Amino acid sequence: MYIVLLGAPGAGKGTQAELLREKLAIPSVSSGDLFRSAIEAGTELGVKAKEYIDRGELVPDGVTIAMVAERLAQPDCTEGVILDGFPRTVAQAEALDGVLAEMNRRVHAVLYIKVSEDVLLKRLAGRWTCRDCGAIYHEVFGPEKTRGVCDACGGALYQREDDTPETQQRRIAVYLDRTAPLQECYRAKGILIEIDGDQDVDVVHRSVMAAIDSLEGNDTL
Ligand code: ADP
Ligand code: AMP
């Protein structure tokens, strides 16, 4: 099953992707994580992407599409994928359809995690991420057990450089301008499912699973 998680920065896509990955046993592919790995590795792509990420802008479609297409071509992606943060533009959505069509696959559902702007800002401001395994915490809504230490792997937690107040505002504005139009595109295709993301993590996860279960009863998968 190929599932897209759509939502503004801080909506909880990464958090829900991880829970879904465990439940569905298919990989989750986060374009943001792929960029951060490239930055960490100091590759040419990483250097180029960092300029955009630090400003809260989208990385250009060409390099983003090529990077995700390369990831989707890997053998673990043949049975399904949870896409987190991709597509973010209409061009990326079209490219995704093309890549999946070549694999004889398609997007089965787009789960739009809807969260109000004041909640997004609170979530982004308190987000901490594990440098080693990428686990996501929140200093108020979901803190780690030992301060600064990842519960899952013992790695050190850090706050993302693009989670500054100025960049947060810019990323939300970019989302509204470039990514929000995808809601209508996918709604028109009949594959958009709206999830109330303003709830606790567990409640959102249950809504996500209910949406997936409703798809599994559908024999067009
Ligand atoms: P995204 O991937 O959409 O940018 P994240 O999954 O990284 O969002 O979540 C942003 C922050 O909000 C993290 O600190 C995470 O722990 C927290 N968070 C995610 N979902 C919820 C929720 N339902 N309630 C409260 N906090 C949440
Ligand atoms: P995320 O981890 O999803 O919050 O993404 C962090 C940053 O990476 C974004 O603010 C963008 O600069 C960049 N990025 C991630 N995914 C994409 C994408 N699909 N298209 C363009 N830029 C992206």
Image: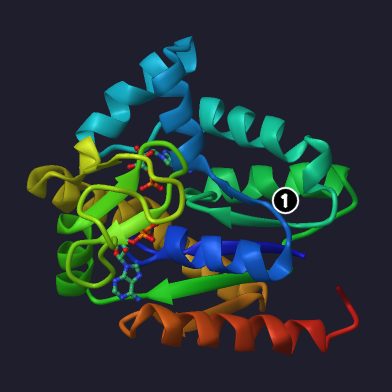
Residue shown at the point (22%, 48%) measured from the top left:
148
Dot 1 falls on a residue whose secondary structure is: helix
Quarter assignment of residue 119:
bottom left
Q: Quadrant of the C terminus?
A: bottom right
Q: Judge by depth and name the residue closer to the eye, 73 or 177.
A: 73
Quadrant, the N terminus? bottom right
**Residue 94 at x, y = what percent?**
65, 48
Residue 101 lies left or right of residue 156; in this view the side is: right
- Is residue 67 shown to the viewer in this render? yes
Return the x and y of residue 182 as percentages of the image width and height: 49, 62
Image position of 108 with respect to 33: above or below: below
Density class for disc 1 (Cα within 10 Å; few <14, some 14-19, many ≥20) is: some
- Of all residues shown, which one is farthest toward the left? 165
Query: How far across and how far down the image is residue 42, in percent?
Result: 42, 12
Q: Look at the numbered disc 1 and say if its residue's Cβ is closer than 8 Å to ligand 2.
A: no
Residue 4 placement, left or right of 153: right
Q: Is residue 94 above or below residue 55?
A: below
Q: Residue at x 22, y 64 (%)?
A: 123
How is the rendered protein coloured?
Answer: rainbow
The x and y percentages for residue 127 are 24, 55
Can residue 60 be seen in the rendering of this structure?
Answer: no
- The amino acid sitting under disc 1 is Asp
User: Circle 1 sits on which residue?
Assistant: 97
- Count how many numbered circles sit on residues in the image: 1
Picture quadrant of ligand 2: top left
Q: Quadrant of residue 12?
A: bottom left
Query: Which residue is found at the position 21% from the left and 33% from the top?
Result: 55
Tell me which residue sits at (59%, 54%) in the image: 83
